[in-house]
Amino acid sequence: MDEFDQASEFEELRRAIALRTRKPTGPQATGCCLFCGDPLPPGQRWCNADCRDDWEKLQRAQREAPPCE
Ligand SMILES: [Zn+2]
């Protein structure tokens, strides 16, 4: 196996892992940031990692402590 083969195999593997780790039931892109509502390019769900992290924290908090009123 030469270096080129190794590089492309690594690339394949990396892509396969990225596909597998993507949550299949994750939120859909709406055209706006799911956290702060800023307009975004199609297919993007958050403006940046901060919005995504905060959104995930919010989701987790809501799941762990559902509002009782
Ligand atoms: Zn945002």
Image (cartoon, rainbow, N blue to C red):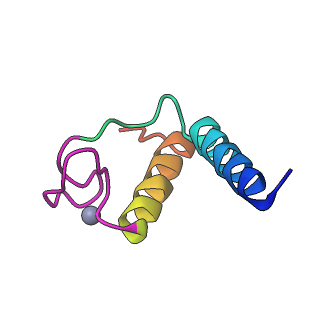
Q: What stretch of residues is rendered in magenta?
A: 30-48
- The x and y percentages for residue 66 are 47, 40
Which residue appears at 51% of the width and 29% of the height?
24
Query: Is 47 situated above or below 32?
Result: below
**In front of the other: 66 or 4:** 4
- In the orientation shown, which residue stands out farthest toward the front? 2
Which residue appears at 75% of the width and 50% of the height?
5
- In the orientation shown, which residue stands out farthest toward the top? 25
- The x and y percentages for residue 33 are 24, 55
Give the quadrant of the C terminus.
top left
- The x and y percentages for residue 55 are 40, 56
**In front of the other: 44 or 54:** 44
Q: Quadrant of residue 30?
A: top left
Q: With 3 as the anchor, is 45 left or right in this view? A: left
Q: Quadrant of residue 38?
A: bottom left
Magenta span: predominant SS is loop
